Amino acid sequence: MAFTRPSAIQMRLAVLTSLAVFAALLATPAHAVPSNCRAMDAGNHKSFESAWGIPLAWLAMTQDVYQRISVGIGLVPALHLCNDPAINAVAVDTPGERVPRVIAVNTGLLTFVGGDADQLAAVMGHEFAHLSLRHRARKTAAYEAHAHEVARDWARAVVRGSREGETALRAQFEMVTRARSVDRDAEREADDKGFSLAVSAGFNPAGARKFYQKWFQTQETRKVASYLDTHPGLGERSGYSARLERNEAFRLDAERAFTARDSRRLGNVVERWIAEVPDSGAAAYYAGMYLLMTGKRQSLVSEALEDAVTFFDGEGLSRLSQEDQYEARMAALSLCVSLHKEGKRQPTLNCLQRLRHPEDVEQFRVATGWRDFILVPSRNEGVSARPLFASQEGDREVFMTNCSHVARERGMKDVRSWRGMREGRGAASPASGSGMMLCNPRTCDCEPYEGADPEPAVRAPRFER
């Protein structure tokens, strides 16, 4: 196939499109401390009260919320108060500046929450999360990657004969759409991590829900979320924070029942919990503890703990909202112990590789008495973005697919190096015949295949043990 070399004019247009795309990105809010802001510390509260009319109690509350979250996360940004009626707070991250990290809180926000420290903690935790997760740098990198990709596609379209002006407008629209999607994803991450930070600092988990619900109710118009919004809709944020709040309430109930060794109460809590929040890592962990307390088969205990670790890894409720929970750490350790009790040595070693703390490995040695192993640090610390699901069919065949809807229909589990292969739970039996599936790799649409073996390129992976 012959390719036409783009002309100098076409290449110049491609460059201009790239510049236009970056110009669209520059329309995002600047990361700088506004001029109407002043540094705040415990010694200058009276000056804010006299100059801006902010009650001393609110100022002391702001300082306390900041201090508790700062100590918990180990970040010490400068705290600023801004004389601005807008209901807002911002995290400023400007490496190289004299004050590289700042959290700025508007007086309008303090007026809005009044004396409710839990609501303020939800907002301030959100801003701390932006700094902790390095969102400014990550968003800039994502913008640049998207800009190059869109500009490349635009240039190719021009070379193929598309109209330059129309295609350039489409490219700019595409870039802005992508940039706003990156913004909204970052805000969701900050909501999740901020919830965890506020709860870990001792604030009521209802703070986030109350704040977003109150804000939503005070709006004069109920604006529908748009692809051009930089933040998720307030309805979405209040609904999801309510779910995290409910999960935390169940977690506290289960923790109390488990500490009291009250298996009946724990079982009741877990049953209601899983019905309401089926993808909670902590719920699956306490389900495993209940099975252990009531003397159920070790394989059932391991299965529940496998679910817990998978959910904590991000396949359930967001990883960021759960990663600071005590149960997230204990689920991994308990899984390793349970796999060892099952006699599954290789999955046990793979499980041990994911323990993040040397003291957890030592606890495993004490609990099991097994010390004859050496752990070599794994290079693969991440979690696969697209899991591979598998189930054992009978005594000898293993069915595997990366199509999530097929996995749900068959009750299949996602494959992890530490996860033993187990049969599907209560799922429909495999299709008659070979159990082979013919899949469309584009749509992930699979159907039972009854004929001769298709070409390997379109077969769902299926292995004999």
Image (cartoon, rainbow, N blue to C red):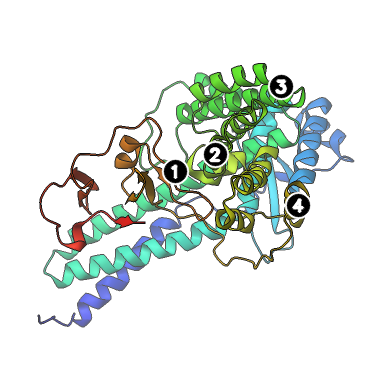
Query: Would residue 153 be found to the left or right of residue 20 on screen?
Result: left
**Image point (56%, 56%), residue name:** 136
Image coords of residue 129 (percent x, y): 63, 46
- Label 1, label 3: how many angstroms apart (C-alpha)? 30 Å
Q: Mark 4 points at which residue?
A: 369
Q: Name the residue under label 3.
A: 257
Q: Is mark 2 on a helix, strand or loop?
A: helix
**Image point (78%, 27%), residue name:** 58
Most foreground residue, 91 or 362:
362
Q: Earlier in the sequence, mark 4 or mark 3?
A: 3
Image coords of residue 417 (percent x, y): 51, 56
Point out which mark residue 299 bears. 2
* Residue 296 seen: yes
Q: Earlier in the sequence, mark 1 or mark 3?
A: 3
Q: What element carries label 1?
A: loop
Image height of 357 relative to 123, above or below:
below
Check disc 1 and give the amino acid type: Arg
Image height of 157 relative to 241, above or below:
below
Disc 4 crowd, CA 10 A, few/some/many (<14, 14-19, 20+): few
Q: What element carries label 3?
A: helix
Query: Would residue 267 be found to the left or right of residue 42 on screen?
Result: left
Check disc 3 and give the amino acid type: Ala
- Label 4, label 1: how many angstroms apart (C-alpha)? 26 Å
- Label 4, label 3: how many angstroms apart (C-alpha)? 28 Å
Check disc 4 and give the amino acid type: Gly
**Image point (57%, 36%), residue name:** 281
**Image point (85%, 35%), residue name:** 45
Cβ–Cβ below 8 Å for labels 2 and 1?
A: yes
